[in-house]
Every structure is written in structure tokens, then in C-alpha cells.
Amino acid sequence: MAALAESFGRGAMTNHWVDMKNSDVILVMGGNPAENHPVSMQWILKAKKERGAKLIVVDPKYTRTASQADLFIQIRPGTDIAFLGGLVKYIIDNELYFKDYIVNYTDAAFLVDPNFKDTEDLGGVFSGYDPKKKKYNKSTWKYQLDENGIPKKDPTLKDPNCVFQLLKKHFSRYTIDVVSEITGAPKEKILEAYKIYASTGKPNRVATECYAMGWTQHTVGTQNIRCMAIIQLLLGNIGMAGGGVNALRGESNVQGSTDMCLLFHILPGYLPMVRASHVDLKTYIKKTTPKSNDPKSLNWWKHRSKYIVSLLKAFWGDYATPENDFCFNYLPKLDDGKAYSWYDLFDAMYKGKIKGFFAWGQNPACSSANANKARQALSKLDWLVCVNLWDSETASFWKGPGMDPKKVKTEVFLLPAAASVEKEGSITNSGRWLQWRYKAVEPPGEARRDAEIVDELYKRIKALYEKEGGAFPDPIVKLNWNYGDGEVDTKLIAKEVNGYFTKDTTVKGKRFRKGQQVPNFVYLKDDGSTACGNWLYSGSYTEEGNMMARREKIDPTGLGMYPKWAWCWPVNRRVLYNRASVDLMGNPWDPERPVIKWNPSTKKWVGDVPDGPQPPLALGGVLPFIMKPTGVGTIFGKGRADGPFPTHYEPAESPFKNILYPKVRINPVARIFKDTPVDKLVLGGDPRFPYIATTYRVTEHWQTGLMTRNMPWLLELEPQVFVEMSKELAKEIGVKSGDKVIVTSPRGKIWAIAVVTERIKPLRIEGHTCHIVGIPWHYGWRWPEDGSGGDSVNLLTPPAHDPNTSIQETKCFAVNIKRA
Amino acid sequence: MDVKFTRRDFLKLSIGSLVLSSLGINLEPVKAYAKELKIKNAKETTTICPYCSVGCGIIVYSKGGKVVNTEGDPDHVISRGKLCPKGASLYQLANNPTRLLKPLYRAPYSDKWKEVSWDWALDRIAKLVKKTRDKYFIYKNEKGQVVNRVEAIAHVGSAALDNEECYILQKFLRALGIVYIEHQARI
């Protein structure tokens, strides 16, 4: 998500599932929709059948998606940037980019500070690298500004300091030979893939890309996606029907839970979390609101103050007034520069700094990298509250493998929750559609809905603070909390999320009464007259009713946008950045697939909800990427921790040299934890762990498997953990399919059943044979109850993380395998 | 229902149907009737699959407070009635012998779970939250800046919750001053 936000402005799938039918070329890399998002495959197959679209699959293993592909290429895990970097070079060398698009809608023509130095200049690092802190000082990563503070440009793209020329230089050594040597893929196949993909640089040809955890779970995860974003910008494939960079998210509501910001660094609607240096609301707004001097840039985040004040009003209601800074100081503040992310959390817990812990609808004992550390950390807690449909490896950790309950002090609560069909509410799919679910039955036994459990807990804690006082009780006792007496009414919550007027007020010439729902976020204000729980969802539950529950099957454009089916953020816009799908006069680049089109007589857009209602650029309108202060798509990603351009670095536990940058083997700013005895890592090859392992999912299971290992039909289909390996490796270690083997890494060991296949082939890398094995991660000791499923592969995965997102590198690590 | 139909009758009918259909006799009314058996008079509600993020539509049929059948929603514009093995198993999520039915509690150093009442569990958790929060509340950081936070309590989860639940959950956690808030999106 960090890469997409850096490139385009929003951290979400750009297009949506049905839209894949509009593509001419579909690249699946870092994902496997046929097995992990199976029903979406019908749209990919429809594009193939009806448009003659080409499907290219690049993966460490031959997947079921690959079985449908026109071209499949096996690459070594963790070499995606080499593969994609070669494609950037191919597009530039052969002038296959969409020039009008990149000159007008991206920063390709922007001039960069001449003091900026590339990895080509400095042997693998960018200017500003501090080897002691393992961090960059980004002061040279900036555009040159003119006297009005607007970036200087060279529309001819010839200036050696322009982004386009810097990009060209950056990838100049990513030749097909080098790409082949790093990835292990054959040259002719690489070239074929490049030819097919780069054919979409024409206005009337569009390619899309689908990725998932195969790209994010790397120490270069953000830059994998950044590289793709750059390619899509070069080819003019963003904003177009059938285009985009599509993050296929893994859970039914992980888009929604991200939008609601159950994450340390953001508040609902992606407002930055408050830091200690934000001494008051004014400072917060000043420091976090981006500025733009370009009159053509809408710079949508300039509205930050309206969204944070409306959020504070939703939180603290009538208590939040202009006089008390809208209760700004009730929000907890993070220390500047400090991360409180997933692995930091378990690190702090392991070190005894965390005393109480909620694991709510989640099973970290199986999902955390280096899961042994998470399991041991749980034993250092005073108390643990788990909320789930089933007992889990997390809730029962105290009786898990290697634990002696008599020595575990942790007090544990396990609260039974209701399943999706036992409650009412909305979830947001990967394409940003909010769909409403209805309650079919009551939860079984005494199980209760999560909303009810939160409500009960809050009310009891509030009562204690009212009665006894305590540390800083105000944020709790004054919290605005009215979701019904007795049963929580989720519609009331949905209405607060949408936002309402707190007093009679006039906005944009329209009069609204106190208590009325706001029509959408355009009507939010920063004077306290509106309350809104999540500005991005504003428009989802209006005076017209619950827009998320809509089920009208009309499709006026024929592009599958279904504008009256459910509701889509933001403001029901189905294709993000759609202003980039038209030329400067508002005519679609591709007249056959017009997402939006300017009607000069009515002076209105037709089609999808445009990214801003302003007229086309040449008619006094605005630039298409309205969430970026520059207004354009970003090739030079100066906000990232590890560089403005993606660079090939080896995975942390790769046994290979970095042939492009011999002095900088791995991402120099990767987050690697090593200050506890359980954080073990082999940097560089170690003969004790000669094979490369990657993790993946199977269709029949989901995540840690808690919601599938308990389902007899599904467990029967995939009963236990396995390790998939090539015939060659199997022969080398004397194993045949069905044998039980022991897989070890520096962190731990698991048993698994060997599955010897043709789907993974050994690769030839730097003159060595490279064996790759794949292990699904859905298993755990608690279910099935007889232990016949095995345990989580995350017991083996390393404590190495992406420096931007702190996402764990579970897609590539060192293991050994022996017969049990 | 007026006509009692046993499973055996149904099987006979099915086998017969195979023979008849191969003879080219129209069996649609019979099939429709057979299908009616399970879902006749059942309440019909729509839902969205709780597994991956495609957002497929499912129709849930319930009778007497029990889910009796689940199937792909043919009207759903993304899934068009199709489901994968997980979505097609939703019935077993609602009818599952291993689901938790009561709050469980494990005392320090104990080797077993014990069933407890909701009231007892929620009161005990509320007290523990307050005790931990009061003891470890941080008003100011080392630099002397006001931070009003609690680092001794952490939270993970969850993408398995509805939007409305996620919203009140993070509101609750932030009002408590908790800063270690994470979930599936990070991993």
C-alpha cells in the first residue's frame, strides 16, 4: 500500500475485479488468483476469451494461474525488481512508452536536484546513505523548483537531471543477460514477456498487473510494487479501464480494516497518526498537510484539517470544541521516528515491556514471522484476551509445543465471537466496494458479535473510571459512544462513519440541519459543525439511506462498473485516477473503453465519478493524480525509506552475491531484528541451510487456517502441511512424494510431507544449482486436534522486514530438509 | 410440508432422473421440486463471503434459527453465482461442532481452560485493563513532550471484523491511549 500511495496517491487497488475483463495484457506476478482469489479468475479468462488478452505469469512455482497463462516464467524468489527493471529498460530503449501521458501526467519531465546521486554513481546506494544508522538522509532527493515553488520541467525529457533520464540511467545495466543471470529465467522467455507487456504503451492497448503477498513480503516489498507502478505510468496504463496496479488483498475485509486504520501509524481515512512533536492541533495540521504552489494541482490532502477535526468530533462529540483544540490531546501520541509495528510489538512483548494483549480475530502464534518468538513473548504477558470463533494456537499457547503450563503466568481469556452470517454490517472488498451483509441466524451458544464485545468492554471500563478515577480518564469517560442500549445497532455506527452535521449549518450554498447525514466528504468542515468517523467512507450512508446495501445491476458504460451495486470509496468512484484516462481535452485515450469523457456542451463528465469534477486540463482543469501535491504520477519516489527508484537487492537470507552492486548485497536499510537470542538470521550463504524456501497458500485453506482447519470438508482436501520440491532435489536428498521430512531454518523446525513435483524446477544461478522449495503456511498444532496437520511454517521465517512497511520477508529464506 | 420425502426417496428420484433425462424427458419441474425440499419456507438473506477479498455473494437459507443451506448468489455482479471451495463451505462455518460456545478462562499456571460467565470475564478484563493502564500510563516522553499513551497494552486484529466493528474497536483502543495497534494488513 505504501508503494501505491507513493506512486499514485492512494494505497489501494486502482481498479476492481470485474474491470479485468477490459485488459489486453494481464501480468500476474506476486500473486496467484486462480488459487487464492479463485472466483476473480473468470474475469481474467473472459478477457482472454473475448478480447484475446494475453496472460503472463511470473512466479517461483508453476501455479494454477500459470496453467491458464500464454506465457509462464519461473524466477528465483526475491528477484522481481531485476525482472521488472529489465522491462523498464526495454520500454525506454525501444521508445515504447506513452510519451503524451508521461510528459503530462507523470513527473518524468521534472528536474531533480543535481546533488542527487544514483546507485549507478555510488555503487548500490543513493546519496545520503548513513552506514552507521542504516538510514538515508533524503535532503538531495528532491525536485528543482522554479521561482514560484513549482517543479522545473523539461518536456523534451532530454535534460540529464530530469526524472526520465535518471530512470534510464538507473536501469541501464538491467540487460536481458543480467536479468536472466539473477532470476534464473531463460533469456528468450524474458524477452517475449517484455515484448507482450510493452505492447500496451499505445493509447488503445491496456495492461493490468495483479499482485498479493508474493510482492509485499520481502525486504524490498515496497520497491517491487513501485517498480510496477513506474512501468504502468510509462505505458500510460493507470486510470484506464483494464489497467492499473491491482493489489489482490488477502482477506474479506482487510481493505476495510486498513481504511479504518487498525494500524499504529494512521487514523481512519489514512490521516497520519499523531506524533509527540505535534504539540497541538494547529501544529499537527501544519506539519501533515501537504502544500502545492501549482495552480493545476488539486492537492486533495489540503483538506486534512476538515477530516481530522470531523474525526475528533466523532470521537469526543460535544466535548470537542474549538476552545479545547477539539480534544486533540486526548489522542495518544507516538514518539517521532519510532515504529510500533507488528514485529516491534512482539519484540517489546518478548522483552517484557507489554503486560496486557488483545489478539482479536487474529492468530499471531501462527502468522507472525519467527513465530517461536511470538509464542514465547505471549508467556511474558500478565494477561491475554483472545476473541475468536475457535480456540487457537495463540489462545492455547501455554499448552503448546515446548511450553510447560506450570511455568506460564499469563492469565488468558478466550471470548467466543459471532461469524459473518450471525451479524449485520459492511465489508470492503479488494476493489474498494463496501458491501452490506445481513444477519441470518443468532450466534451459537453464548457467542457474541464483536461489536457487542467492544461495546460491553468499553462500558465497563468507563464505569470503573467514573467510579474510581485513574490515569487520564477524560478520553474514556468523555468518549462519544451511542450505539444503542442493549444490542449494538451497527447502522448507527455506519452513520457515524459516514458523518453528520452537529449543528444547523450552510455548506456550499446548501442548508443542513443538525443531525442530518453529510452527503459526502466535500461537505465536511473544520469548525466543529460536522462529525465524521472516516472521511473516505463519507457518502456510504446518507439521507438517501444505506448505499452499501444497493443491488442494482445496471452497467451504463458496459465496462462492468455497476455504479449502483453497493458503494465504492471514494465517492463511488470505481476506477481511481480516471482523469488520467483522457487527453488534455477530456477525450478518452481509448475511445472503445471510456472510463470518463468530457461533454463540451453540458460541460460535464460522463461515465465514472471523475477524480475531481473540474474540466479537462486544457480547459482550465486540474492534473489527474489529485492526492499527490504535484498532481502527477510519481516515478521519482522520494518519500520511500530505501530510495526514489527500485533497486535489485538480494533477499536477507539469499546465498547469492548481488551481481549488479557487489558491495551492497541486501537492502541497506532493511529492518533486521537481531538483539534477542531468538532473532537468528544467516546473512549470506550458510551450508547448513542450502535451500531457498518460499511460502504460499492453497485454495482450500485460508490464512493461519483457523477458519478452514476446523471445516471438515476443507481439511479433508488439504489435511496437512507439505513441502513442495523438485524431482532433482528429492533425488539429491533421497526423498519421495509422501515421505515425512524435517525442514529446519536458523529459527526452528517443522515436519512436513514431501510433495515432489514438476512445478518447481532447480535454477542455475551464478554457476550454482539453486533449489527452491515451497511450503503453505496455514497449519498449526491446535487443529486438527490430533496434531496431524503439523505446525506453522512461520516457525521458520526470518526477522527481516521491509523498511517502509515493516512487512516480514516470508517469501524467501534459508532452510535445510532431511528425511524424518 | 404435505408430502413427506425421505432421503431414500430422494435418491431414488435422483437415480431415476438420470435415466429419464437421458431419454430426453423434461425434468425441470421435478428438479425444482426436489430443490425446494431443503429451502422451502426458509428465510433468505444475502451475505458476502468471509474468506478472500473478491467479495463474492452468497445466499444463506435459514430455518428455525439454523442455517440450512448456503449457495452462490447468481445475481451478484462480481461472482455471478460462482464460489470457490472455501466460499462453498460457508454452511460448515455456521454449523460447526468445534465453534466456541462459552467464554473460557485459563488461570495463571493452570493447565486447563474453565468455562466462565460473560459478566465475570468482562468485569475481570475491564479491571485488568484499568490496572495496567493506570500503572503504566505515560503522560510525557523522555523529551518531556505530552504523549498521553500506554505502551504496556497492545492489540492486534482484525480484518475478520466488519467495518463498523473495526471503527468502534480502534476508537475504543485509541481512547484508552494504546499505541501498539496492528493487524493482518501489516503481515
Image: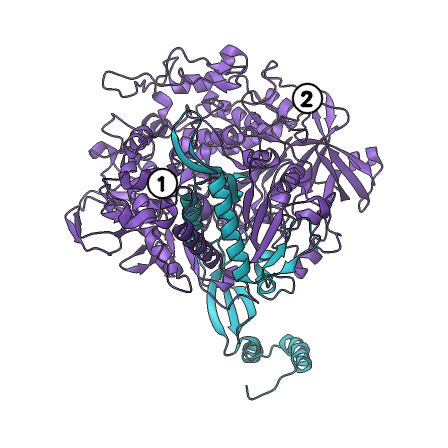
Chain colours: A purple, B cyan
Front-most of residues A287 and A716 = A287
Picture coordinates of residue A188, whole percent (x, y)? 61, 28
Tally of numbered discs: 2
Confirm whether circles 1 and 2 share one chain: yes
**What residue do we see at 69% from left, 54% from top?**
A783
User: What residue sits right under mark 2 in the picture?
Assistant: A684
Q: Nearer the viewer, residue A432 or A602?
A: A432
Please report the residue visible at 52 percent of the width from the left and 16 percent of the height from the top: A125
Q: Residue furthest right?
A: A734
- In-front residue for pair A159/A300: A300
Q: Are marks 1 and 2 in contact (CB under 8 Å)?
A: no
Q: Residues within 10 Å of mark 1 (few under 14, many from 20)?
A: many
Amino acid at the residue labelled 1: Tyr
Q: Secondary structure at mark 1?
A: helix
Residue, far bottom: B2
User: Disc 1 sits on a residue from what chain?
Assistant: A
Viewer-proximal residue among B2 and A219: A219
